[in-house]
Image (cartoon, coloured by chain):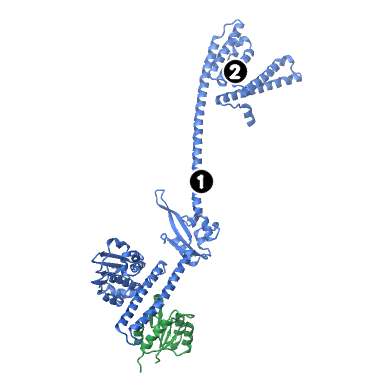
Chain colours: A green, B blue
Amino acid sequence: MSQLALIVEDDEDLASIFAEALRGVGFDVELVADGRMAQDRLINGVPPFLILLDMHLPHISGADLLTNVIKNDERFAKSVVIITTADARMGEAYTEQVDFVMIKPISFVQLRDLTSRLKPKEQ
Amino acid sequence: MNLLRRFLTVSTSDPDDTRRRRILNILVVGIGLLSLFALITSLVPFFLGVLTWENVSLLITGSVVTIFGTLLIYLINYFWSGRVSATIFLVFLTLLFAFTDTPDQISGGRSLFAFTIPIIMASILLVPSSSFIFSGLSGIVISVIALSIGRFPNIPAIIGFFVIALVSWLSARSLEAALKELRVINANLDQVVIERTRELAEALERERIEAGRNQAILNSIADGVVVFDTQWNAILANPALRAMLEIPTELVVNKNFRDLIEHPRLSPKSRHLLYAMMEHDTQPPSFRVEWGEKTLSISAAQVYDNSKDRHSNIGTVTVFRDFTREAEVEKLKSTFVAIVSHELRTPLNAILGYAEMFKEAIYGPMNNKQVNMAERIMKNTQRLLGLINDLLDQAQMEAGKLTIQMAPVRPAELLENLHGVMDQIAHEKGLRLTSEIDDHVPDVLNGDGARLQQILVNLVNNAVKFTDRGAVQVRLFCPYENKWGMEVSDTGSGIPEDELPYIFDTFRQVEGGATRVHGGFGLGLSIVKQLVNLMNGDIHVKSKVGVGTTFTVTLPLVVPAENLEKWRNL
């Protein structure tokens, strides 16, 4: 099982904090800061074990990526999907479709603890 | 007829005089025409040679004299004096009768009755009492004639003349009295009619001024006003409405409201709102509709007629206000608040994250002071985030955008989350935070979980803020069968009685200068109250200075169908 985590987040600082939390747990981290680039990466690259997806992104929104790409492609069936949003209402609307919803502000410790529970045991 | 009337009538200021002169005119004209007829009937056989001059001379002379006599009397009557002309006429008549028969017959025989004619006429053509003068004159005439033929005057005839004069005097007098009375009645009637006419004219004028003033007021109102009858037919609309809707008044007035609602410029949602307004007697005081590019605020009020015994609805007044600018500003404001809150929250999230990384010593060991400082950064950031959330909630509530979304909620989970958020904060102040759930509270109930949580956290946060020692207690309970409630009590400083009515006001803490020690915008309780109201619930507060405060929230209890049986069996 791949140890790859894909972080899709347009804010540089948040992306760096999320990346640090995931690296701390032991994931290999890949960062994308834009909806269109994220779409290319998802379609053309290796399916990640974990996708941390911001719902508000430039060009293509996280909601569209989720509906049109991730939910539409068998390759992501086993991927753990966590969405991040500042809008609690929006988050509630997606609870059925994704594994976890995190409402911003997102705590470093909270994210680290959650992902450490999700990470597959190393062989 | 008019010409004849003018020919016969003499206009004077005295109605009695006018009447008498008119009668005299009729008589003299009649006699004059009779004489003319006599003249013609005597001249024709004379010229045909049937009769000789001796036969007709008397008749012709008499007729000509009579014609000129009546003409003279007529002219005197018409242009000068009725009294003189009547006197001349009656004297002439009396003398005429004196010469139309033999002296023998006149003094004691068949012609005596002819003298009664001027006596009776005198009472009509002159003043009533003048009949006595003419009875006297007739008496003298027959006496003179009798003496001239050596006879004794006819005393019974003279007495008879006086009796006739008496009778005609009495009847003429009563006739005149009756006429006078009639004239008085007529005059009074005229006066009454004049007064009534004047009053009516004044009332009409007042009505006109009043109506004009009302119309002027209606015309000068900047808002569009339409008045509907009970069947929603528009009976009145002012010019502002025409300008606002940019359609001719004819499309509104005398038309049913439905015609206006079906206008293509109205958005479907607005149409729905307007139909709802028509169909329901109870309606919100005002609401907004989209009319083309414009946003209009509409308020409707029923009009009641209180003037009669019954309190009856006579229609509806609707006021249209152009709300386009306000709506734009409002939209701008809520967009602004949303952007600002998002833009503020993102960097705060970053600060929080980095501070946590410090605290967690991600990049190497930290000493206690450094950890403490990271904790302070985190705490202050959390506070700032809380304030931004409050401001955003307040802005959303003001814009009417905050809605309650019902879903199954577990009350126990509300308390678990509450402890997760508040335990640390209470502990730091040395306070105990305890909670309990009454047996009657169902395991699952319908509610807006996030908002219920917010109410609880705000109330407990508030309690912790104003309590220095003791405990904060939270209790969930069921006061009645279809209600449930949340109670938060503390052992804090309490709220003075005169402050109690204002504690739910927006920005209250900011206004009350003395309370600034506790920080915050003072939005917490205001938001709680508004949320409770949105959930159709109530909030009450009991407080005693130095003893503590208890907030009680009561909400409608709805248990999801699948949990109902289980809850009933408890």
Identify whether B233 is placed above or below B159.
below
Q: CA distance from mark 2 to mark 1?
A: 60 Å
User: Mark 2, chain letter?
Assistant: B
Front residue of B417 and A106 = A106
Residue lying furthest top: B150
Percent of width and height locating residue B357: 35, 83
For badge 2, the amino acid type reads Thr
Percent of width and height locating residue B240: 52, 57
Counting residues from the start of the chain, the first of labels 2 and 1 encountered is 2
Q: How many numbered marks are there?
A: 2
Residue at image coords 52%, 24%: B176
Percent of width and height locating residue B99: 64, 13
Q: Which quarter of the figure has residue B150? A: top right
Which mark is on residue B208? Answer: 1
Percent of width and height locating residue B283: 42, 61
- Left or right of B198: which side holds B570? left
For badge 1, the amino acid type reads Arg
Tag 2 secondary structure: helix
Tag 1 secondary structure: helix
User: Mark 1, chain letter?
Assistant: B
Q: Specify whether residue A104 is in view.
A: no
Which of the image's four quarters has the N terminus of chain B?
top right
Q: Residues within 10 Å of mark 1 (few under 14, many from 20)?
A: few
Front residue of B149 and A75 = A75
Residue at image coords 70%, 17%: B60
Residue at image coords 73%, 14%: B54
Residue holding disc 2: B87
Q: Which quarter of the figure has residue B479? A: bottom left
